[in-house]
Image (cartoon, grey):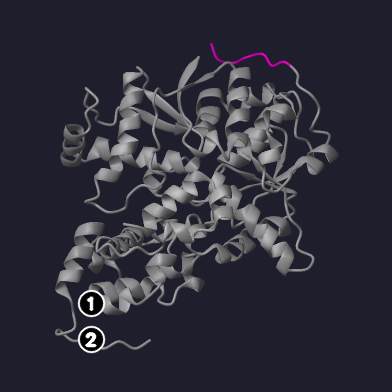
Amino acid sequence: MSLAYYPGCTLKTRARNLEKPAVASMEALGFKLDEVPRWNCCGAVYSLADDDLIHRVAPVRNLIRVKKQGKTELVTLCAFCLNTLKRANLLMKEDVEKRDTLNDFIDEGIDYSGEVKVVHLLEVLRDDIGWEALSQKVKLPLRELKAAPYYGCTLLRPREVAIDDVEDPTILREFLKALGASPVDFPESTRCCGSYQVISSPDDIAEYARPILNSALSHGAEAMVLTCPLCDYNLGQGQKELAKKQSGFREMPLLYFTQLLALALGLGPQVCHFELNHGSPESLLKEKNLLSQSRSVQPIGG
Amino acid sequence: MYVTISPKRSRREFVRKVKELSGQNLQLCYQCGMCSGNCPAASNMDISPRRIIELARLGLDEEIAGSKTVWTCASCLACAVNCPRGFDLSKVMEAIRLLTLRKNIDHIRPEDISPKQRCELPQIAMVSGLRKFTG
């Protein structure tokens, strides 16, 4: 089964370790992630000003190309892209005046009114495949791995584009349980990592990371599970700084959820590109016997 | 922090522009402070998020312009989802940032980002940061 897929800029460069294991895992499950032809940068952040239509052109143009592809659903992996595309889609669906202005401006041959459903890969796993079916495909259960699911902001806020309950999300916890891991809930799992403040105030990033990392560590986590390349960068750099400043501070391996998916499906470490991770997870994974080589998986999708 | 309020000081034009850009009704806020309590950046701000709303609706643009608060906001929307009045402060923060950026006054210069950081940062950091801090 083929799914329209929007990678975004970061997944083709710094965060290949988020994309590669996702593509391999979905293929093993019988789903082809089919890149939207000629996709462009989504703009990374959704403009919050009512009159700022020009910054909505980029995400809407991508959505039009999905429609042209003949698809009704668009799968995203990067939490920033999900948020920007989903909010732009909502605008095209609900605001007739702005939709008309944007359609008049964008010369793609067809009009668009929010027909495409924008989803995150985690939603495909939860809603289309299901946790039970996924757990049956696990070849290498992530037993004894105490992993803290970190959501950050853009998967859950604002409310109208959230992929789960805003205050008590469970999607990553259920995902980890399906893979056989032991999820570690912690109260700061939806607290902001500092986001783009790293550009203007790089020295503050460690202080944004501190309560998040301390909370996960104090609840017994051995690793943190992420969905966003900017969270990965900020928490990774943040904990390096904290280790320098605070004696006894323990750095924690940071992993993308797709890397754990690939490992659990038995696809082996070669698709995970751990060399790009900010908090190196390999010694922990080795200790847990999770770095064995690939095995074959019976696909789910038709 | 003490501010003097009088009809003479109040900038109605500023209030109008903030309302127009943000689409938010500033009078909705009843100053409960939920936004400040939930803001992960509040400790780095000189004026708390709750006070920004109060200053904005009083039209005290000089106090706001001199503050670093709107440039410290990471648009994480913790304020918006926790507001009991359904007020979206992140849109007001953006409106105030834009009132400066649209005068062609940038908050950061791309050349001030260190070459090392430029090499290492994920693209979403560069694009979003430059979108928020430059006009």
The residue that disc 2 covers is: B5
Q: Is residue A258 among the parts visible in the rendering?
A: yes
At label 2, counting other C-alpha atoms closer than 10 Å, the crowd grade (few under 14, some 14-19, many 20 or more) is few
Q: Secondary structure at mark 2?
A: loop
Comes first in the chain, label 1 or label 2: 2
Q: Secondary structure at mark 1?
A: loop
Letter of the chain that mark 1 sits on in the rendering: B
**Residues shaded magenta:** A296-302
Residue extending farthest top = A302
Q: Nearer the viewer, residue B106 or A262?
A: B106
Residue A262, relative to residue A206: is it above or below?
above
Q: Nearer the viewer, residue B66 or A177?
A: B66
> In the figure, residue A81 lies in which quadrant?
top left
Q: Residue at x 36, y 62 (%)?
A: B84
Q: Are marks 1 and 2 in contact (CB under 8 Å)?
A: yes
Task: Say which amino acid is labelled 1.
Answer: Leu
Q: Position of residue A235 (x, y in %)?
A: 62, 54
Structural distance between the alpha carbons of marks 1 and 2: 8 Å
Task: Say which amino acid is labelled 2.
Answer: Ile
Q: Is residue A299 magenta?
A: yes
Quick check: A153 left or right of A300? left
Q: Nearer the viewer, residue A185 or A92?
A: A92
Residue A75, relative to residue A68: is it above or below?
below
Q: Residue at x 34, y 63 (%)?
A: B106
Q: Is residue A165 among the parts visible in the rendering?
A: no
The residue that disc 1 covers is: B58
Q: Which mark is residue A225?
A: none
Quick check: A9 left or right of A98? right
Q: Position of residue A253 (x, y in %)?
A: 72, 48
At label 1, counting other C-alpha atoms closer than 10 Å, the crowd grade (few under 14, some 14-19, many 20 or more) is some
> In the figure, residue A114 lies in which quadrant?
top left
Quick check: A246 left or right of A164? right
